[in-house]
Image (tube, helix red, strand yellow):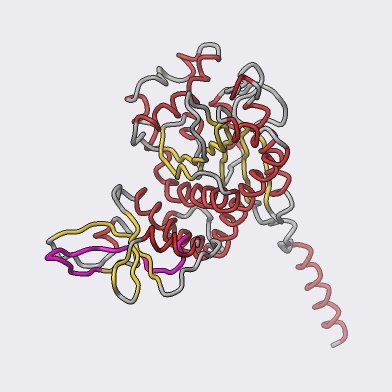
Amino acid sequence: MKTKIIFSFVLIISLFFTFPVATAAENPVKPFVVVLDAGHGGHDSGNTGHNKAYKESDIALSIVLKTGAALEKIPNVKVIYTRKTDVFLELRERAAIANRNDADLFVSIHCNAHSSQAFGTETFVLGLHKSQANFEVAKKENEVIYLEENYEEKYGGFDPNAPESLIGMVLMQEEYLDQSILLASLVQNNIVQNLKQNDRSVKQAGFWVLHNTYMPSVLIETGFLTNKKEGAYLNSEKGQTEMAREISNAIARYISSLSEANTNLKLRDPEIEQIKVEKAIEETKEDIYKGVIFKVQLAASSKKLDLQPQNFKGLKEMSRVREDGLYKYYYGETSDYNKIEMMKTFARQKGFDSAYIVAFKEGKKVNVSQVLKSKAN
């Protein structure tokens, strides 16, 4: 009997060493990879702002490095920089860096310019330009390809000055559009609410640097260097630190929302994009208006539609009211104005271009501007 016991023990030990046991070290969790791209660099200084006193490439780099330093403190987040010094990078190489590293997110940071004293922050996702102004911004950023050798061959005949060149760019990024919009909304909300920047909103435009990335991607125009006040702010240590803080906080919130909504799932699973949006919306900084309910009005029609997501381009949380002989269709219902702003942005990017916010108090429609003004006072 004793011999049998010894033999069994030896057999168990030998099996243990014959078949390796998987450990956490052997199967590490893939880090969430964020690629931060500082616009311009090297002989491409970007715009030089008011009286040519600033250098966009330096300001963007400073904001990127500060943003990255904050994100690197988050467990299981890996930050990769397209550049960490004042060097020139081709547009396609910026995207290639993200693709080679199987990035989960691509964020490109820039500063804006205009011949007027325009001011404010705007965040872009890839899409067909919906206005001439959006096209002009994209054209300005895309024109850096003219600084590259053999650009005609490298970019397959792409012409930054031709609107038709932008059409084919949208298709590749469509899978990630909703997630890009979500991050863009979080960035825009943080900067506008916490830094009191003028809100130039989340927009779609044809940026080449976003075109070739295979993950959610945004481009942030932090502000206008050509504006006297805003240019000085962005050129300052204070301005760059504050911008980096709000951008990194938005990215952290985005990552957190995906992690919670996608336990044991791929973060970029398109099947649960709606969950991601709703999760992140719930986590936004609250701005509660007690006694007031906000909704997003999508449409008014004589036709009575069933409130199923397929009738509203996938949107849930729909309601319907008959008023003045028409059916009015609303998306969302909340007393948090920040949340409804994000839902409006999401609805517009889904295709409801004329979506707008309405307010109700005690069941009656009230003027939104008056509601906002009353709280401010």
Residue 63's place in the image compared with 7, above or below, is above
Residue 48's place in the image compared with 355, above or below, is above
Residue at (66%, 51%) from the top-left corner?
A: 31
Residue at (50%, 45%) from the top-left corner?
A: 216
Which image quadrant for residue 84?
top right
List x then y, in percent, for residue 109: 58, 36
Find out whether residue 329 is within the magenta segment: yes
List x then y, in percent, for residue 69: 73, 45
List x then y, in percent, for residue 125: 45, 41
Residue 365's place in the image compared with 301, above or below, is below
Residue at (53%, 55%) from the top-left corner?
A: 267
Instruction: State whether residue 57 appears in this view.
Output: yes
Q: How many marks?
A: 0
> Would you say 23 lies left or right of 10 here?
left
> Would you say 279 lies left or right of 238 here?
left
Q: Which residues are magenta?
A: 320-337
Judging depth in this view, the residue of 131 and 366 nearest the camera is 366
Find out whether residue 55 is within the magenta segment: no
Instruction: State whether residue 158 appears in this view.
Output: no
Q: Magenta residues: mostly which secondary structure?
A: strand
Judging depth in this view, the residue of 365 and 129 nearest the camera is 365
Residue 187's place in the image compared with 152, above or below, is below
List x then y, in percent, for residue 133: 39, 31
Which image quadrant for residue 61?
top right
> Would you say 139 lies left or right of 236 here?
left
Judging depth in this view, the residue of 279 and 190 nearest the camera is 190
